[in-house]
Amino acid sequence: MEELLRRSEKLTTVGQLAAGVAHEIRNPLTTLRGFLQLQLETAKLNTRHVDIMLSELDRINLIVGEFLILAKPQATRFEVKDIRFTLGDVISLLDSQAHLCNVMFVTDFGYEECRISCEENQLKQVFINVLKNAMEAMPQGGEITIAIRHHERQLCVSIADQGIGIPEEKIAKLGDPFYTDKDAGTGLGIMVSQRIIQSHQGTFEIKSKVGVGTTVMITLPLYRDDNSAA
Ligand code: ADP
Ligand code: MG
């Protein structure tokens, strides 16, 4: 019975998601079709229209891309990784972009054990999503502090920005698919990130204060080496 309930809940979620995706992809497709038709009727290329078509195509690509991360056809492979290196890779990846936006990354990793069992590419995707949101919340630039703390057998990664913050009534909506207030946003970053962290038996939490900043806290279970003599 419980299993049935769980499955039907899952199906509802999948159904809602599918409806959302179909809608989000149909909009740019309709625009594309309209503009293509126009090019055909006027028999000449309007470069402004072509620009719009390209950006609509990019949008579809972005949405489909985010879902591919979730769908992952191949079996997920969990490996033991030191999360400091995973974070380090993501920070180097975003560093030049951050520099251009006057954003500085400050790290506070500590020296304690940081090995976790994870699908590293998926975790990288989570950190990229969260760090990008942090950067986008600071149009004038600022600092993003990435800290690692330990609590019993859990590791906690916090990512704190000095950005615009999120009003309380909006916090509950975060993680709903397609919830975004950005012109070029997909509103999928947080949802995808939450699911990835869930599949790692972790937790994903957002605290924020308008005008002060936002902190995303991610906890993950530390790797237990059961073969080591205790
Ligand atoms: P997107 O970035 O495409 O809008 P996300 O799922 O990543 O989608 O984020 C959803 C919304 O949550 C954003 O549009 C923004 O309003 C809000 N948000 C997320 N992270 C932050 C942050 N660090 N500071 C302020 N607002 C944020
Ligand atoms: Mg985002």
Image: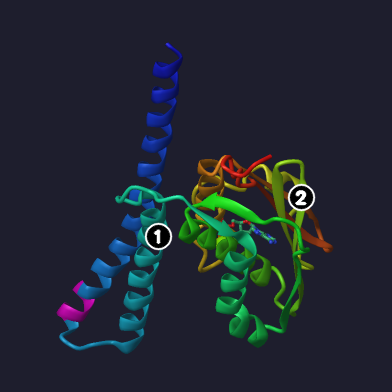
The image quadrant in which ligand 2 is located: bottom right
In this rendering, which labeled residue sits more in front, label 1 or label 2?
Answer: 2
* Amino acid type, residue under disc 1 in the picture: Ile
Q: Residue furthest right?
A: 212
In the drawing, what numbered circle is on residue 150?
2
Depicted 10 relative to depicted 209: above or below? above
- The residue positioned 42% from the left and 30% from the top of the image is 10
Q: Quadrant of residue 211?
A: bottom right
Depicted 65 relative to depicted 7: above or below? below
Depicted 76 relative to depicted 84: above or below? above
Disc 1: which residue? 63
Report how many numbered discs are placed on residues in the image: 2
Q: Which residues are magenta?
A: 37-41
Asked if the stretch drawn in magenta spans residue 204, the answer is no
Q: Nearer the viewer, residue 182 or 116?
A: 116
* Amino acid type, residue under disc 2 in the picture: His
- The quadrant in which the N terminus is found is top left
Query: What distance separates the C-alpha of mark 1 from that of mark 2?
Result: 35 Å
Asked if the stretch drawn in magenta spans residue 39, the answer is yes
Residue 19 image position (x, y, % from top left): 36, 42
Q: Residue furthest top?
A: 1
Is residue 144 rendered to the left or right of residue 36? Answer: right
- The residue positioned 67% from the left and 42% from the top of the image is 172
Residue 107 image position (x, y, % from top left): 75, 70
Residue 117 image position (x, y, % from top left): 54, 49
Is residue 225 rendered to the left or right of residue 33? Answer: right
